[in-house]
Image (cartoon, rainbow, N blue to C red):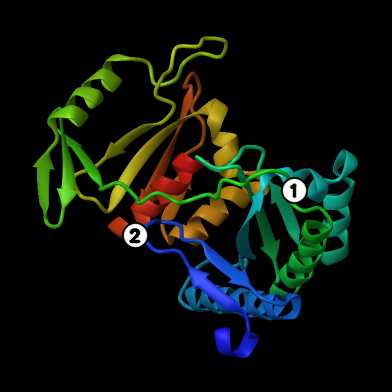
């Protein structure tokens, strides 16, 4: 990709569920590199569907990291600019409302065909060149994923290699979590536990209980977010129907420990 595009392509270090790809160089070189990356993602989607029962092909999805001070220009007055980009390219574009953790940057999610994504990136680059960032930018740095945790017999264990190691601090936290309601009612300022995680001893399946107030941001418009999490993590994720009188919905995640860990990270991030 570096040789064919002429762009500098760097991938951030670390064993994180997310890593940042930085592309620098002349505009044409950047677009060439983006094109190659988008086509590679589409190849992976096609390969994953070979033996799959899924009938509808998911779109290619990329997340750009953009300084928050430039997002206003990207959205435009009354959302006019982002609407123009969506209509002219055919790509879906969403600008996150909140800044990424410990940074002054926001995520811009683009999904669609590789051609639509390339055209969309071109238009975003034009906006960013016309409206440089204001002030200093604190870059987003993904944090490493925490070790898997098992709760069994009222105790917490962290998974290290093939062994489960007792964790006294997490055991206390688990016991507290079981004594208190999982979600603080709206209007109260007392911090609660927004999502309860129950990890079965079989590390191939976990169940998550998500408050009804939060389930929408995990599912996304027409299922776009949950499909993105499925695609990025490789895990199977099922959301149970709401039961009468319950304030939560059950989300079941199955897959390899790595798939489950990534899906858990992405759901927590949402």
> What is the number of the mark on residue 15?
2
- Packing grade of label 2 (10 A; few <14, some 14-19, many >=20) is few
Closest to the observer, 166 or 179: 166
Q: Residue at x 32, y 58 (%)?
A: 258
- Inspect this view and state whether residue 263 appears: yes
The outermost residue toward the bottom is 4
Q: Secondary structure at mark 1?
A: helix
Q: Is residue 26 above or below residue 54?
A: below
The outermost residue toward the top is 188
Q: Position of residue 182 (x, y in %)?
A: 39, 21
Q: Secondary structure at mark 2?
A: loop
Closest to the observer, 136 or 261: 136
> What is the number of the mark on residue 98?
none
Closest to the observer, 57 or 25: 25
**Which mark sits nearer the N-terminus, 2 or 1?**
2
Q: Is residue 111 above or below residue 185?
A: below
Structural distance between the alpha carbons of marks 2 and 1? 29 Å
Q: Residue 23 vs residue 232: left or right?
A: right
Q: Residue at x 27, y 15 (%)?
A: 179
Q: Is residue 182 above or below residue 119?
A: above
| Residue 61 image-quadrant placement | bottom right
**Quarter of the figure that contains the N terminus:** bottom right
The outermost residue toward the front is 135
Q: Residue at x 76, y 69 (%)?
A: 116
Q: Position of residue 153 (x, y in %)?
A: 12, 31
Q: Residue 265 vs residue 65: left or right?
A: left
Number of callouts in the render? 2
Q: Position of residue 65 (x, y in %)?
A: 61, 54
| Residue on which the image places disc 1 | 70
- Packing grade of label 1 (10 A; few <14, some 14-19, many >=20) is some
């Amino acid at each position: 990709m570096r040789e064919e595009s002429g762009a500098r392509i760097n991938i951030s270090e670390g064993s994180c569920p997310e890593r940042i790809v930085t592309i620098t160089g002349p505009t044409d070189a950047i677009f060439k590199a983006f094109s190659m990356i988008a086509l590679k993602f589409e190849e992976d989607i096609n390969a994953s569907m070979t033996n799959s029962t899924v009938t509808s092909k998911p779109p290619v999805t990329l997340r750009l990291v953009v300084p928050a001070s430039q997002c206003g220009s990207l959205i435009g007055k009354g959302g006019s600019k982002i609407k123009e980009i969506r209509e002219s390219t055919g790509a879906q574009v969403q600008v996150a409302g909140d800044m990424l953790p410990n940074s002054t940057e926001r995520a811009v999610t683009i999904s669609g065909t590789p051609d639509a994504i390339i055209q969309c990136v071109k238009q975003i680059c034009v906006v960013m060149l016309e409206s440089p960032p204001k002030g200093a930018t604190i870059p987003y740095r993904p944090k490493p994923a925490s070790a898997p945790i098992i709760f069994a017999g009222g105790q917490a264990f962290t998974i290290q290699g093939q062994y489960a190691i007792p964790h006294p601090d997490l055991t206390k936290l688990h016991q507290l979590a079981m004594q208190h309601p999982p979600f603080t009612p709206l209007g109260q300022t007392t911090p609660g536990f927004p999502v309860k995680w129950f990890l079965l001893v079989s590390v191939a399946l976990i169940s998550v209980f998500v408050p009804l107030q939060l389930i929408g941001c995990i599912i996304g418009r027409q299922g776009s977010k949950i499909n993105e999490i499925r695609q990025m993590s490789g895990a199977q994720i099922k959301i149970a129907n709401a039961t009468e009188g319950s304030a939560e919905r059950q989300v079941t995640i199955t897959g390899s420990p790595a798939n489950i860990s990534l899906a858990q990270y992405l759901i927590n991030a949402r």
